[in-house]
Image: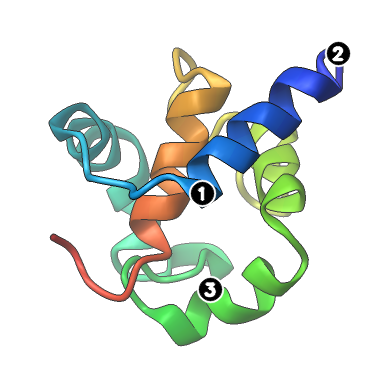
Amino acid sequence: MKHPITLAAILTFASLSSWAIDPFTVELYQTSCKICHAEAVGGAPKSFDASAWAERLSKGKEVLLANAIGGYKGMPPLGMCSDCTQEDLVDLINYMSSEKAQ
């Protein structure tokens, strides 16, 4: 990672803030993540299924973010969101790993 301090700040802020779903995050999910995560295609954790995300979250959000940025197993780098920022990816991880869509 080029900017570990920035990454740590983003993850800390995302964890400590009362996170509200931004409509932009929902739009990114619909256009970039839903295709695989809605039905757990190719081993992707199913959206809004806390048990599907539990093991991944136990490794830490830094690991999830690094996997989203660099790609993991069948997921290409940045998933299907080549324009996503680190902040966007953190928001998407928080959104998809929540208990249910809000």
Instruction: Tell me which label, 2 or 3, sits earlier in the chain.
Output: 2
Residue 2 numbered tag: 2
Quadrant containing the N terminus is: top right
Q: Is residue 7 visible?
A: yes
89 sits left or right of 55 in the view:
left
Crowding around mark 3 (Cα neighbors within 10 Å: few <14, some 14 to 19, many 20+) is some
Whole-percent x, y for residue 85 in the image: 51, 18
Mark 1 to mark 2: distance in Å?
23 Å
Mark 3 = which residue? 53
Amino acid type at image mark 1: Leu
Instruction: Tell me which label, 3 or 1, sits earlier in the chain.
Output: 1
88 sits left or right of 26 in the view:
right
- Please tell me whether mark 1 or mark 2 is closer to you in this view: 1
25 sits left or right of 71 in the view:
left
Amino acid type at image mark 3: Trp
SS at mark 3 in the image: helix
What residue lies at 54% left-to-right and 37% top-to-bottom?
13
Mark 2 to mark 3: distance in Å?
26 Å
Quadrant containing the C terminus is: bottom left
Crowding around mark 2 (Cα neighbors within 10 Å: few <14, some 14 to 19, many 20+) is few
Amino acid type at image mark 2: Lys
Residue 16 numbered tag: 1
44 sits left or right of 29 in the view:
right
Instruction: Tell me which label, 1 or 2, sits earlier in the chain.
Output: 2
What residue lies at 43% left-to-right and 27% top-to-bottom?
88
What residue lies at 73% left-to-right and 60% top-to-bottom?
60
Whole-percent x, y for residue 61 in the image: 66, 53
What residue lies at 81% left-to-right and 21% top-to-bottom?
5
SS at mark 2 in the image: loop
Query: Considering only vertical position in the picture, is 9 above or below 45?
Result: above
Q: In front: 99, or 49?
A: 99
